[in-house]
Amino acid sequence: MLREVRREIQIVFQDPISSLDPRMRVKDIVKEPLRASGFNDKRRSDEMVKEMLEIIDLSPEHYNRLPHEFSDGQWQRIGYSPRTDKQA
């Protein structure tokens, strides 16, 4: 029951920039909520991350970049991106 509810509820930090781990690549930051909800299909999760990046106006080439390589606005979109997908 609790696991089902967690799939529907996600934390949105007020300051997403400080919530991003500077050592994690964008793909891992965006993928983290998928893993936490029990979604383990690597190929599909990679596709979903690329789709989410496109939704927030980042190209798939941003997939392997680190947070410090983005502007403040991009950081904010990255921080919110996992919360925009309900397919998982």
Image (cartoon, rainbow, N blue to C red):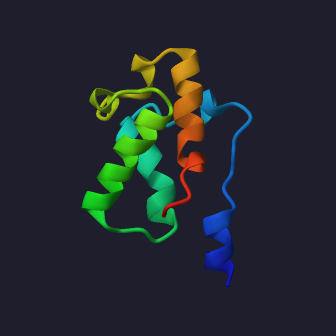
Q: Quadrant of the N terminus?
A: bottom right
Query: 81 above or below 2?
Result: above
- Percent from the top left, x then y, of residue 78? 52, 33
- Seen from the viewer's position, the closer of residues 85 and 15 is 85
Query: 29 above or below 1?
Result: above
**Residue furthest to the right:** 14
Q: Residue at x 59, y 27 (%)?
A: 76
**Residue furthest to the bottom:** 1
Q: Residue at x 38, y 46 (%)?
A: 49
**Residue furthest to the top:** 71
- Percent from the top left, x then y, of residue 10? 66, 56
Residue 2 placement, left or right of 88: right
Q: Is residue 33 visible?
A: yes
- Percent from the top left, x then y, of residue 87? 50, 61
Query: 77 above or below 29?
Result: above
Residue 84 placement, left or right of 66: right
- Seen from the viewer's position, the closer of residues 16 and 48 is 48
In which quadrant of the rendered view does residue 61 lie? top left
Q: Residue at x 60, y 39 (%)?
A: 80
Q: Is residue 24 visible?
A: no
- Percent from the top left, x then y, of residue 39? 42, 68
Q: Looking at the image, how many numbered discs can be counted on the residues?
A: 0
In which quadrant of the rendered view does residue 41 lie? bottom left
In which quadrant of the rendered view does residue 63 lie? top left
Q: Residue at x 48, y 36 (%)?
A: 55
